[in-house]
Amino acid sequence: MEKKSVAGLCFLFLVLFVAQEVVVQTEARTCENLANTYKGPCITTGSCDDHCKNKEHLNSGRCRDDFRCWCTKNC
């Protein structure tokens, strides 16, 4: 009975270790690019985010200090 418990515990640790490795490898790097079609000064991040998601089909967007809309995508 004790051998089964040790084997089961080792199997559990192995599964947890493999699951952790899968999570680490799936995280993607992101890059920011200036929005191609955003018009006017970028005042609210919400409008920039909507533009990047809906018009340019990218992950997200935000206004930066230069009042331009920058879109985020996976590199």
Image (cartoon, rainbow, N blue to C red):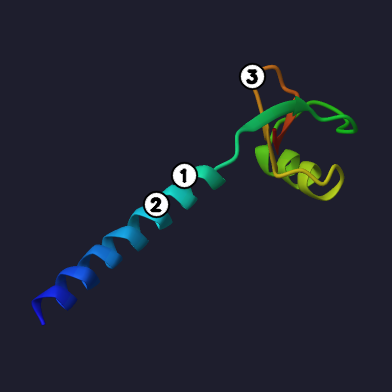
Q: As shown in the figure, which amino acid type bears the numbered disc 2?
A: Gln
Residue occupying the point 87% across, 46% down = 55
Image location (x, y in percent) of residue 75: 69, 33
Residue holding disc 2: 20
Q: Nearer the viewer's eye, disc 1 or disc 3?
A: 1
Residue occupying the point 69% across, 28% down = 32
In the drawing, what numbered circle is on residue 65?
A: 3
Residue holding disc 1: 24
Label 1, label 3: how far apart the Cα atoms are: 32 Å
Position of 3 with respect to 32 (left or right) is: left
Contact, mark 1 vs mark 2 (Cβ under 8 Å): yes
Residue 56 location, quadrant:
top right
Contact, mark 1 vs mark 3 (Cβ under 8 Å): no
Contact, mark 2 vs mark 3 (Cβ under 8 Å): no
Q: Secondary structure at mark 2?
A: helix
Position of 28 with respect to 66 (left or right) is: left
Q: As shown in the figure, which amino acid type bears the numbered disc 3?
A: Asp
The 10 Å Cα crowd at callout 2, few under 14, some 14 to 19, many 20 or more, is few
The 10 Å Cα crowd at callout 3, few under 14, some 14 to 19, many 20 or more, is few
Position of 24 with respect to 6 (left or right) is: right
Q: Earlier in the sequence, mark 2 or mark 3?
A: 2
Q: Earlier in the sequence, mark 1 or mark 3?
A: 1
The N terminus is located in which quarter? bottom left
Label 2, label 3: how far apart the Cα atoms are: 37 Å
Image location (x, y in percent) of residue 54: 82, 50
Image location (x, y in percent) of residue 18: 41, 55
Which is nearer the eye, 69 or 7? 7
Which is nearer the eye, 53 or 29? 29
Q: Secondary structure at mark 1?
A: helix
Q: Secondary structure at mark 3?
A: loop
Q: As shown in the figure, which amino acid type bears the numbered disc 1?
A: Val
